[in-house]
Amino acid sequence: MKKFVAIVAVLVLGGALASAQGAQFASASTGRYTVWSDAGQEDAEALAATLDGLFLVYNEYFRFDETMLKAPLTVRNFSAKDAFDAYLVKVIGETKDDFVYLHYPTAERSELVVYRKDSPDEFSASLAHQAFVQFLKAFVPEPPLWIREGFAVYFERTAYSEETGAVTYAENQAWLETVKLLANQDQLYSLTQLMTLTSDEARDGLDVFYPQSWALVSFFLNSGERRYNRFIWDVIAQLEPTATLEENQAMARDFFLRWHVEEAAQEDFASYLAAQKTFAELVTTGVSAYGDKDLDLAGRLFTQALAKNPSSYIPYYYLGLIAYAKSDYAAAEIQYVKALELGSEEPITNYALGINAFASRRFDDARLYLQKAAEGDPVRYETKVSEILARMESGG
């Protein structure tokens, strides 16, 4: 944990509100953030460190001059949703379903308000999203809506890692299936339409605006055509802190049209989307390749699927099957065990582990796994297991 400039402070928040609730807030400060938390000093420091890490990831893309910050960014954390709601009602007269960034003309008054969710992953996603909005608007108060929301979604899987002790970017493709479906149904905006939607239009068309903004940012960042990569960096550099929303959006659109023919870019965008594979598509194609005994292709597809969804047992199980088919029994066991840890069907995975151990002549392990398989699903495995155990006894 990094050392903080300010160490401990306790604040009674918001006059009458805090007095009524008896709320006390610990504070932790870095050069970039001041965090207030009703969950205590350790929580404030941990959250401040995470936010500092998020800031660094964001600024790898935006390269803003930190000295332009007029004050540290303020984040207020509540340990319970009801306290979060009560604070928002006091401050803005209503509550919100999720984290909210309250932006005011002065940086000192603006703040990101969050609360602890039951799911750490959901907390991290909401924090990464709204902390990016706070980051961007601290430097450019009126950025183009598609840049603001597209990058906010792009960063949603960026989170603190216990393994590395750092905040790291992870690809977010949660909206890929949705945006591909919208593209197939011809429901997407044209590129220049998306770039110039008003706030009301974006809100009314949220089901399209939100996923397509993410997809467009992903296209500009990851396209194999360098002219599209160049566009996003150049347009970020031209965002004007004193411009209105309409002016910044018009600048981005006009700069885009200066270098690109919209119809051709629209086709390139559509081709990019079509080439992106969802987790389900990769798994389906991988199963087919495995069935066709194209083990190398299947391995690549399941490895890609794993990168998109590391919490699913399916890629691990099939990577185990592939390793077994290549007689790499040690690798197969690692994959099967991981699949079990993530919730794969126990009888079938234990059977696979047993067969794998038998093939590598680890008969004691094989008996253990096979017996578990037979006990878990006697109809499917009891006879098969009995035959294999008999072969072991006979030295076969």
Image (cartoon, rainbow, N blue to C red):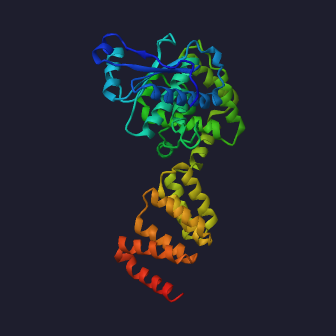
Q: Which residue sits furthest front?
A: 8
Q: Which residue sits furthest bottom?
A: 394
* Quadrant in the picture for the C terminus: bottom right
Q: Is residue 326 visible?
A: yes
Q: Is residue 265 visible?
A: no
In the image, residue 376 above or below residue 55: below
Residue 134, horizontal then vertical, whole percent: 51, 22
Residue sitting nearer the eye, 119 or 38: 38
Quarter residue 151 falls in: top right
Please give the name of the residue rendered at 58% of the width and 75% of the height, measured from the top-left corner: 360
Please give the name of the residue rendered at 52% of the width and 43% of the height, measured from the top-left corner: 173
Residue 303, horizontal then vertical, whole percent: 59, 56
Residue 229, horizontal then vertical, whole percent: 68, 35
In the image, residue 59 above or below residue 20: below
Residue sitting nearer the eye, 76 or 45: 45
> Number of numbered discs present?
0
* Quadrant in the picture for the N terminus: top right
In the image, residue 17 above or below residue 116: above
Residue 157, horizontal then vertical, whole percent: 52, 39
On the picture, is 374 further left or further right than 167?
left
